[in-house]
Amino acid sequence: MVFGPQRLINITGRIVYNEIHTADWWWETQDLMPRDGTVVGLLFASNKTHLTYFSGDKAAWLVNMSIGNISKDL
């Protein structure tokens, strides 16, 4: 879990953006929070799922949610 923004800098001195907590918006939003507060980004995704086994030739669009404080590797 990540509870605050992080800056990743490679050996050439350039900023690396690879997770939601390395984004510039997290730094800007964190500055608006109270001292003990933290940003919890919500990630939503949707995909079509076929329901052929249950109700014939029907499909549903499921909505998946996760929080951005969890590393993408997990």
Image (spheres, grey):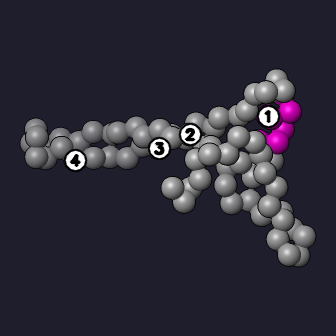
Disc number placed over residue 50 in the picture, else none: 4
Secondary structure at numbered mark 2: strand
- Identity, as a three-letter code, of the amino acid under mark 2: Ile
- Identity, as a three-letter code, of the amino acid under mark 3: Ala
Q: Mark 4 or mark 2, which has the lower sequence index?
A: 4
Q: How many marks?
A: 4
For disc 3, the marked residue is: 45
Residue 5's quadrant in the figure?
top right
Callouts 4 and 2 close, C-beta under 8 Å: no
Q: Mark 3 or mark 2, which has the lower sequence index?
A: 3
Location of residue 33 with respect to 17 vertically, above or below: above
Q: Does 43 lie within the magenta span?
A: no
Disc number placed over residue 67 in the picture, else none: 2
Secondary structure at numbered mark 4: strand
Q: What stretch is highlighted in magenta?
A: 25-32
Secondary structure at numbered mark 1: helix
